[in-house]
Image: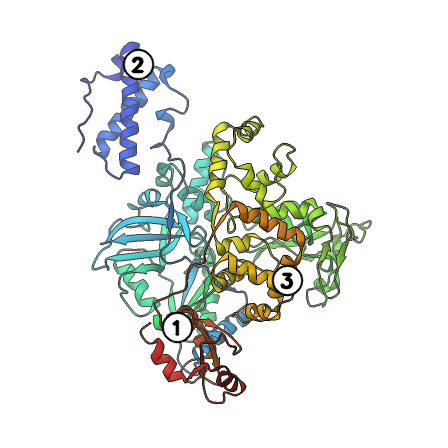
Amino acid sequence: MPKKPARPPEKPVAELTIDEATAEHGPLAAELAEHDRRYHQLDAPTISDAAYDALRRRFVAIEELYPDLKAPGGESDKVGAAPSEKFAKIRHRVPMLSLNNAFSDQDVEDFVKSVRRFLGLAAEAPLTFTAEPKIDGLSCSLRYERGELVAAATRGDGSVGEDVTVNVRTMARRAGGVPLKLKGDAPEVCEIRGEIYLGHADFAEVNARQRALGEREFANPRNAAAGSLRQLDPTITASRPLRFFAYSWGEMSALPADTQNGVVAAFGAWGLPTNPLSTRCASVAEMLAFYRRIEAERASLGYDIDGVVYKVDRLDLQQRLGFVSRAPRWATAHKFPAERAVTVLQDIEIQVGRTGALTPVAKLKPVTVGGVVVSNATLHNEDFIKGIGGDGQPIRDGIDLRIGDTVTVQRAGDVIPQVVNVILEKRPPDAAAYVFPTVCPACGNPALREPGEAVRRCTGEFACPNQVVEHLRHFVSRRAFDIEGLGEKQIEFFFNDPDLPVRAPADIFTLAKRDAANLKKLKDKEGFGETSVRNLFAAIEARRTIPLERFIFALGVRHVGETTATILARAYGSWKDFEAACLAIAGGDEAAREDMDSHDQIGETVVDAVAKYFGADHNRALVDALTKELTILDAEKPQTESPVAGKTVVFTGSLERMTRDEAKAMAERLGAKVSGSVSKKTDIVVAGPGAGSKLAKAAEFGVQVMDEDAWLTLVAGA
Ligand code: IVH
């Protein structure tokens, strides 16, 4: 333990002369700061709480006696240790996923049916679900090793979260908080996941304190919880009564039970707070009854929930069901209906998106919906304004929306607020029908609506500044290049800047060439100091190396979202192979087209979009300029240890031991590519009874054929 700094014998503060007080003040401030750091950041205090309090009292008393000593922002203004620059990142060893949503009883029934279908379970076969309140907080992953809390991370983008260990540690002493040590015989490694939240009473208190301090109040308990946890100064977190419910897990060296319910019960036994309302349901009727009961009790629970989560209880079934993209097949969130409010539609603004889509946005008289002030809502497209739904059928009884109308708006969770209804009786007599623009408000080029499409699009493409800016925004967005310090605002700034224009993605990287000229030009501009310019350039430099899937997603090809980009990246492995395939498709190569189409979840729409994108000269120029600046990392290799890794497999005929979907999902998990048709590239055809033409094709190409049992033997243990 380090030696305590030597301190002169203490005189009562009231007897200190100005010189004595001045001499003591500085060292005392430094000493307090060091104790704060040891306590909050190193978790290794060297003095007792009482001794610390005595020091701090003396310090405050000195400043009260000689207020001139007090420095603004000095030690006495701080609640604790100096904040670190920013949060470090933690890579989740098991991704933190989100949930699919159900909004109606029918959706829940469909969810259960899809689970049964996937598993090949008859309607009468028993199948148990857990039903749990869906806590409206923020998810957090707590890592315990040998029973001790060693790390805590926010969800982040699901793969990488922020290191909030120091902050979470401050939640330890409170009931309903997070234990620093697990009780009982918890396995060596336990990654416990759950929700951090703020109760209603605590939320009111936090806001009262904010008010008293003249600080901004939080809109709702979830924002307050997030704001309290993501604090660079952990003593602020410590002063907010955050709580935790454990409901899920990441890496576990051993599982304490073979059901969802059993594992969560074990969490409870290890001292983690778990939700007492969670239960098990044996039928859709029981699930819906639970939902109704929780909905009725919602207001009196003392914390915010926004629905109910159903999970398949048996873990072996969860394992078989697996995941699609970012959500498990074995769980769904049954959301409560959105909250609504009435307000006035003051204007309709047309936004031009990345793909040229003209999207009308309602400018509303600000109104509070479920605790959040709403002043914008999406109006989707021109049909929506006219009172026509996506299926061509009337919505709102076919009533159109007019500027000046009184409307009902709703908001559900993070979803963009929606205008759901018009109160026709309140329509001003002079309100005129809205005329949707037929030219782009940004560039003046014609905006056309293709037959059968609801969306009107600007035809300006690269001549339309809005499309270019939106394209750049997408390029730097969180799931794409994610360049720190280069957000929507900065993109717009650089786009319009005459000295350092960023008009295409490659410009971002030429901008960051740290030549003195660029640095100087930029730091002379308003809002950019030398440090911020250096930081920005460093952040750009850090992204010169990028994983293939992110790169493909960042290009912003229509219909190629994150999931599709990942599938394509894994399918082609490297940028070189992917680009070659795209160029071949754009050039009309049928075999290349078929090959892309053969990948699971990739269809005509994507292939057409890729062909169109790579067929356009300006896109090719953009990609060429960009790839010169970058190193694109090959895609994460699929599992290579399994005997079917890298093989192309076709399932045909009926399978008896598992459903087609399950077989496909299993093969993919093991690194195989599942194709719908047999070609010379096929490695294995798994044929069940009733297999027909594909079997003949397999013979023609000399492809290995096996039955379901042989397949299961082949992959057993992989
Ligand atoms: S399970 C793989 N259970 O809801 C399963 N999530 O909308 C992961 N949430 O990100 C989640 N209560 O932050 C689960 N009882 C509960 C939950 C819950 C709240 C949150 C969680 C998740 C989000 C998805």
* SS at badge 1: loop
Dot 3, crowdedness within 10 Å: few (<14), some or many (≥20)?
many
Q: Which mark is residue 586?
A: 3
Q: Earlier in the sequence, mark 1 or mark 3?
A: 3
CA–CA distance in space, label 2 to label 1: 75 Å
> Quick one: 562 or 187, which is closer to the camera?
562
**Quarter of the figure with the N terminus:** top left
- The three-letter code of the residue at mark 3 reads Ala
Q: Give the residue pinned by disc 2.
A: 22
**Quarter of the figure with the C terminus:** bottom left
In this rendering, position of residue 313 left or right of residue 617 = left
Q: Earlier in the sequence, mark 3 or mark 2?
A: 2
Q: Is residue 58 above or below residue 236?
A: above
Can you give x and y, in whole percent of width and height, for residue 154 in the image?
40, 49
Q: Earlier in the sequence, mark 2 or mark 1?
A: 2
Does residue 183 show up?
yes
Dot 1, crowdedness within 10 Å: few (<14), some or many (≥20)?
many
- The three-letter code of the residue at mark 1 reads Val
Q: Give the residue pinned by disc 1.
A: 644
Can you give x and y, in whole percent of width and height, for residue 613 in the image?
63, 57
In this rendering, position of residue 381 left or right of residue 301 = right
